[in-house]
Image: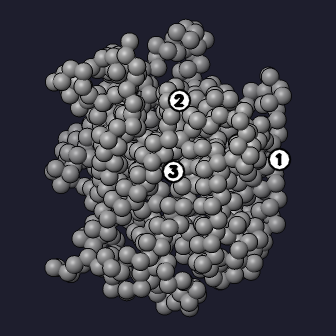
Amino acid sequence: MSPPRSGYTFRAFFLGALFAAVLAAGAPYGNMVLRGSYMTQDFSTPGALFLFFFLVGVFNALYKCAFPGGGLARAELLLIYSMMLIASAITTCGLSEYLLPIMGSWLYFATPENRWDDLFHPYIRDFLVPNDARAIKHFYEGLPTGAPIPYDAWLLPLLGWSVLIVAIYFAMICVAVVLRRQWVEREKLIYPLAQLPLDMVRQSDQSRLPPFFKSASLWIGFAIPCLISSTNAFHNYFHVFPQIQLASSISLFRDTVHLPVVLSFPVLGFAYLINLDIAFSLWFCNVLVNVQKGLYGVLGITSGEALDTFSVNPPAIAHQEMGALIALVVLTLWVGRGHLKDVCRKAFFNAADVDDSDEILSYRVAVGGALVSLGLAGVWLYLSGMPPLVALLFLLSAFAIFVALTRIVAESGVPEARTPMMPQSFVATGIGPAAVGETGITALGFSFTWATELRVVVMASAAHALKLLDGQQGRHRPFFWALMLAVLVSMVSSLWAILDLSYRYGGINLNRWFFGGGARAPFESFVARLLLNPTGPSWEGWFSTGIGAAIMGGLMLARHYLTWWPLHPIGFPIAGLWLMSHSWFSIFLAWLCKAIALKYWGPHGFRAARPFFLGAILGQFASAGVWLVIDACTGMTDNRIFSW
């Protein structure tokens, strides 16, 4: 048997950059102009899987048929997919579709009624925003006929923001490198979101069409969401076709709480891959927190505190789950303290007994790079208006959230999640607006450009890309350059596409959230609110944070020391998210199906059903992508068949 071919070839880098650019520019077109299915909004990265499905199952297979012995090698395919993972984390809600609208919303939405001119405009640093009022107006409303796009108005502020963002993303990749061995080799997390692309290319070097595509149960699972999605898509073209509803709700506590009951095929498929105790934790904790919300309403338990639009409501639960998130990070690092000690010995003292030759960066570069990048980011935030202590606390909070979300996704495989509390609100309510200052609050508001919903983050994409390297032989230093190339290509492609589309059609006419509520929210629900009502710090919030941390710590200790303990702690920090409320029923179904399969048919039954559930994921994403292409050709808009 010939040795496996290297993935670090010119064509792999070129195709990876090309696919990343297509995804980065195509996703904004899909959700802004076509207003169709969102393909790059969550950790599940539907757009990357859609393109990878056709690359592996169609184009590469046809190329191998035409030229035997040719085609892309398995390692090359995984490199291309890894670059698309990075692109998925940048192009829409990860960065670009918040960055540009928020850079202009401070001026466009300012009115005499909201008094933004007086409240915070004087505190905005010049390098943060375009200062051409007409350029911002036309960005939201469209250019006059024949007028050129004013790229010069955006060039300097975008270059300034790029310094911060590239530093943040580089630090994220460095942290992912530091944590890789602990999570992949020592704790052996299963990374459910990485299983589908790995299955798609398994034994691809030995056959024209990988065995994955030859499974009958795969295509049965594939067909079900395809048929349902296509029926709903045809309904939007021809109303004679029925519309199949997959969502309902259960009313609780005198109709004060509505628990969604939604069948999501991707959630169903990914949840089937995880351990039973983790699946149980995810759906049970969500139901439990919804009951908690209902009890708060019935008992009249309220809070005078208000958080930003993106954080969980009520604030007590947001603080509670933020405490759980912090406890998860602290205890995760404590469990990995042996590995982290080895990393530090190698980074600072070049310990001979620690081998980092299989990492994409040496530990010295990873640790040093993270520290230097975070230092640069801290200086940048200080120049934007944050006091040094605020900048430090904000960066620590943000990276704690990045690590926690990456850990949660790597262990539980939830395709949709985000932080229960934004790091901006955690800092502002934790130390109080007076300690942050007017300029600091304004700078924190602008940080929503890159740390907003956090439904997909580069650290999680990098961690899953590193998981794809598991088992590949040789040195992987070039892999780092592929990831950084994807960062740069995706930023340039997505920002160019959004500027072009916004000036052509008028951003306010394209996407109501990214150019409307989402663009106003940092200033309406955060900056203006805190400047008008500078109360705090929130001791009630700190109490709830402590309660959440204590509960999470107890759950993790019980899990570690009590073999009979049934509840995995991973579901608690994200239990209050509306995304989890839309996912709990599908996770419950997957948990039930897997429990029955294991009980009556054992591991063989689980493995036999696995292709069906993988097919359900792929069928939903493939149909969503195909219909976006059809809609682009026909001019149809608002034909959204998949949202999350």
The amino acid pointed to by label 2 is Asp
Q: On the rendered image, what quadrant is the N terminus found in?
A: top left
Secondary structure of the residue carrying numbered label 3: helix
Q: Which residue is mark 1?
A: 550
Q: Whole-Å distance between the Cαs marked 1 and 2? A: 35 Å
Q: Which of the two labelled residues, at mark 1 and mark 2, occupies the earlier sequence position? A: 2
Residue 50, horizontal then vertical, whole percent: 33, 38
Q: Which of the two labelled residues, at mark 1 and mark 3, occupies the earlier sequence position? A: 3
Q: Nearer the viewer, residue 591 or 54?
A: 54
Q: Nearer the viewer, residue 506 or 384?
A: 384
Q: Whole-Å distance between the Cαs marked 1 and 3? A: 29 Å
**Residue at horizontal 64 percent and vertical 68 percent from the top:** 378
Q: On the rendered image, what quadrant is the C terminus found in?
A: top left
Tell me where residue 350 sits by quadrant. Answer: top right
The amino acid pointed to by label 1 is Ala
Secondary structure of the residue carrying numbered label 1: helix
Residue 181 vs residue 613: left or right? right
- Within 10 Å of disc 2 (Cα), the crowding (few <14, some 14-19, many 20+) is few
Q: Which residue is mark 3?
A: 458
Q: What's the mark number on residue 276? A: none
Tell me if residue 246 can be seen: no
Q: Whole-Å distance between the Cαs marked 2 and 3? A: 19 Å
Residue 557 vs residue 464: left or right? right
Vertical order, 361 against 445 (above or below): above
Q: Which residue is mark 2?
A: 470
Residue 300 vs residue 207: left or right? right
Residue 233, horizontal then vertical, whole percent: 26, 42
Vertical order, 184 against 302 (above or below): above
Query: Are discs 1 and 2 less than 8 Å apart at CB?
Result: no
Residue 245 vs residue 389: left or right? left
Residue 500, horizontal then vertical, whole percent: 27, 68
- Within 10 Å of disc 3 (Cα), the crowding (few <14, some 14-19, many 20+) is many
